[in-house]
Image (cartoon, rainbow, N blue to C red):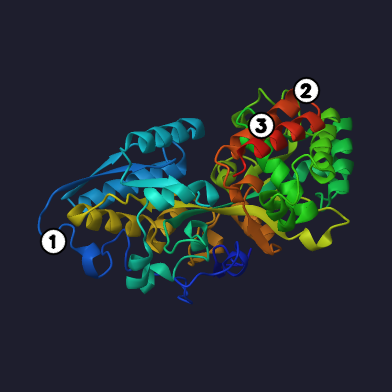
Amino acid sequence: MKNKKRWLGMTASAVLLTGAMSACGDGGDNGGNASPAGGASAGASATATAKGEKVSLTILTRDSGSSPKAVAFAELLKRFQQENPDIAIKDESMNDENAFNQKLKTSMATGQIPDLWTNYGGEAFKEYAKNSALDLQPYLDEDATWSSGFLPLLDTWQYKDFAGTYGVPSEFYSIAIYYNKALFQQIGMAPPATIDDLAAVSAKFKAIGIAPMAIADKENFRGGHLLTNLSLKKFGQAKTDALVSGEAKWNDADMVSLLQLMKDWQAAGMLGDNIVTTDNNSITSNFINGKSAMLYEGSWGISQLAASPIADQIGVIPFPSFADAPDNAGVWFGGAGGYSLSKELKGAKLDAAVKLIKYLTSADAFQYYLEQTKGGVYPVKMTVDESKVDPVTQAYMQALDASTGFKLELYAYDPIAQLQDKVRNEIQGLFAGNTPQKAADAIQSFVDANRK
């Protein structure tokens, strides 16, 4: 590939979610005045250590363990503390999603809220925004260099019925399909563009003893992600909105047809074996070792795949579309995760926390992640030299070029707090043997019982 520079995230800055918010300007390359190398913004946020007052902050994220990103995150925290000796940080981060969610729920229930924590905004975060999170809009308004560097993702933490911005993005995520170029050459077919294509290539791979696209639903969010992708590609965001308003039902013919398709794929062996008891490490290992042709995975998988021995053989495609719904082909399942600050922060501790959140979400911080992980996609505008980026990141960025919008999971827009768990559990039950109608009826019954 030619040695040239391009926006990391490219077209995402124009199409993500519902559009740019007022805090996002046209600030080009965010060189990062609030950067790991030095300064915070002007004003109150720069005064945390000016008086020599020692403060301690707690932070809860998913960046824990030995992954390249987690190691880079730990190093950034270490550097921040070295540059700010009056600010101590207690890192309580944990990688496991269930353990993280439980710790966060317990913290909120006991009133021991972390000073900074990771979340994914949306309706599920709305009550936290009202009661627990700090409104960051004044700080975004104060520091245009910082706020203008973000891709248009701030609406993830904004709500129609009360003002403010209650989080800022620290990650951009989306779901794609990684594929093994050599295996596709072996069957003489192109990677699938449509659902029909997916069925055709899967049959070819099954015939030669290769798993087409294994799914690991032991971590049951993956089944929920699959249903979301199918719904977005078939019906677009309109179906999601109709489910939230009650105009559509989870057990209507549309939704049952999608669950039936998933069940049919399972029966045909397209999704691998032992879906409910298989974890993601297993299917990723199988993909890397040539035992499966495609890997249904998020952008967070880039670094592991880029470090694999088959990195040069990995291509990336969007989730296949439906031939009878071409207008939805460019819609991706994706969005942002980010950081929020506790509403309880005051004085020097508040100043220190604002300084830290700017430090961790500066372009310089994301450039550091890029250097350490050798790739990835990030939620800020910054230029990168493609010759220095791994081939999997390059392939992912090329796949994103065809995107026309990014939408969250079906249940992320619904105010029913436990709907996410219910849908994911019922899909897991579907893979374990339940019928599509039974799964759909159980979800709708739950909605009927909990709709206000």
Cβ atoms under marks 1 and 2 closer than 8 Å: no
Q: What element carries label 1?
A: loop
Alpha carbon distance from label 1 to label 3: 51 Å
Alpha carbon distance from label 2 to label 3: 21 Å
Q: Which of marks 2 and 3 is in front?
A: 2
Q: What element carries label 2?
A: loop
Q: Quadrant of residue 51?
A: bottom left
Q: Name the residue under label 3.
A: 283
**Label 1, residues with CA under 10 Å away: few <14, some 14-19, many ≥20:** few
Q: Nearer the viewer, mark 1 or mark 3?
A: 1
Q: Kindly identify the residue that appears in the image at 60 percent across and 42 percent down.
A: 305
Along the line of sight, the residue nearer the viewer: 223 or 63? 223
- Amino acid identity at mark 2: Gly
Along the line of sight, the residue nearer the viewer: 109 or 73? 109
Quarter of the rendering occupied by the N terminus: bottom right
Cβ atoms under marks 1 and 3 closer than 8 Å: no
Q: Kindly identify the residue that appears in the image at 88 percent across and 47 percent down.
A: 196
Along the line of sight, the residue nearer the viewer: 228 or 70? 228
Alpha carbon distance from label 1 to label 2: 62 Å
Q: Name the residue under label 2.
A: 433
User: Is 133 displayed left or right of 121 in the figure?
Assistant: left
Mark 1 vs 3, N-terminal side: 1
Asked whether residue 318 appears in the rendered view, the answer is no
Q: Which of marks 1 and 2 is in front?
A: 2
Mark 2 vs 3, N-terminal side: 3
**Label 3, residues with CA under 10 Å away: few <14, some 14-19, many ≥20:** many
Quarter of the rendering occupied by the C terminus: top right
Q: Mark 1 points at which residue?
A: 50
Q: Kindly identify the residue that appears in the image at 39 percent across and 32 percent down.
A: 106
Q: What element carries label 3?
A: helix
Instruction: Find residue 99 and report its horizontal and vertical position in percent.
Output: 46, 30
Query: Seen from this angle, which residue lies furthest front?
Result: 452
